[in-house]
Amino acid sequence: MISVFTKPQLLAFGPNKNSISFILPQFSLKFNLQMARSAIDEMSDTGAFKRTASTFRNFISREPNSTFPPESGRYHLYVSYACPWASRCLAYLMIKGLEKAITFTSVKPIWERTKESDEHMGWVFPASATEEPDAEPDPLNGTRSIRELYELASTNYVGKYTVPVLWDKKLKTIVNNESSEIIRMFNTEFNDIAENATLDLYPSHLRAQIDETNEWVYNGINNGVYKCGFARKQGPYEQAAKELYKALDKCDEMLGKQRYICGNTLSEADIRLFVTLIRFDEVYAVHFKCNKKLLREYPNLFNYTKDIFQIPGMSSTVNMQHIKRHYYGSHPFINPFGIIPLGPDIDYSSPHDRNRFSS
Ligand SMILES: N[C@@H](CCC(=O)N[C@@H](CS)C(=O)NCC(=O)O)C(=O)O
């Protein structure tokens, strides 16, 4: 039998590893991927993925004389429904009851060229409200891309153009682009406005435990799936995959004894874990090669994911169309033809067994 499809051959990494050339022999097609200033640049010489730190780190605070006080209608959250880090923030917006106080917009799911003058690929807004379901043109600044927002906020910005972006309409700047900090602000600083002010996802008695959990969940799972997917050598991939499954096994075991990851109370650590789990079987198992075991093969983790999904407000933050189209469509070095797998199409609103624990 003659195989029609042959593997794309990696020809070369470009200068500073910012570009990659592929050739697909069956079509004599050559891709020149210039991915400056994006996740694709975050490769170390060992072939391992290394995430860089976020840049805008201001805080909205209730303290007197705060530059960024928590005013209703003043802030806007730019997200992609595809992005797990942005989805954390969106989840907080919904479950804290902040959707009237803080507006939000989602970009289009698939990365596009952000400028004519260079090859950067990144998040862009649709040109009209009807172009892309669940995405909207930038309602505040009329920008075409998240990159333009960063350039509005800082004329000499050098770095990635990531979502989430928490924008201040009054000072016309980025307050913060680090999701782990944005969720802390949403948890406490808007409690005079939040409809669900009493919900505290980072209560003082659980803080040490939440911090400790976040640490291994981030390294093993949240960032772990990216370390698997973006590895460019076998060794770093295998190391990341082992760490990932060690962490998932640990979660499954813990969740056999308690409803949530830090006990029987919902906490920040659950929201941070959930955004990765909900993408696991639909995307990471295939696209990022996290296939040693599927989420639905872990009884406790699978039921737990359904439980969190069914918290009022949460399901509206999960847009599986955007999620799948983004990952399978925005990383041509992993999936050159952009084919989106049909399955598994899991119904996370189906019954779960987590009510067996008191909460
Ligand atoms: N540390 C950031 C990470 C955000 C992040 O990496 N976002 C990705 C999407 S999932 C992004 O916007 N990437 C754009 C790029 O790599 O160019 C956070 O947690 O807020």
Image: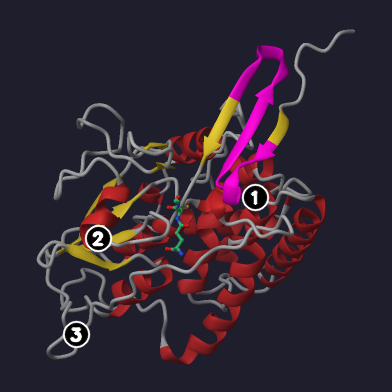
Which amino acid lies under the numbered mark 3 shown in the image of this protein? Arg
Kindly identify which numbered label has been placed on residue 155: 2
Q: Which mark is residue 62?
A: 3
Kindly tell me whether residue 278 is visible in this rendering: no
The reply to whether the magenta stretch includes residue 158 is: no
Residue at x-position 90% and y-position 7%: 1
Write down the region rendered in magenta.
12-30
Q: Earlier in the sequence, mark 3 or mark 1?
A: 3
Give the secondary structure at mark 2: loop
Q: Earlier in the sequence, mark 3 or mark 2?
A: 3
Total of numbered circles in the picture? 3
Compare marks 2 and 1 and give the one earlier in the sequence: 2
* Amino acid type, mark 1: Phe
Is label 3 in a helix, a strand or a loop? loop
Q: Which residue is mark 1?
A: 230
Gap between marks 2 and 1, in whole Å?
Answer: 30 Å
Name the residue rendered at 30%, 72% in the picture: 186
Q: Choose between 221 and 304: the one closer to the eye.
A: 221
Q: Is 28 within the magenta?
A: yes
- Mark 3–mark 1 Cα distance, whole angstroms, equals 40 Å
Please tell me how crowded label 1 is: few (under 14), some (14-19), or many (20+) other residues with Cα within 10 Å: many
What separation in Å lies between label 3 and label 2 (alpha carbons)?
29 Å
- Foreground mark, 3 or 2? 2
Percent position (x, y) of residue 106?
Answer: 30, 45
> Which residue: 52% across, 59% down?
274
Residue type, numbered disc 2: Thr
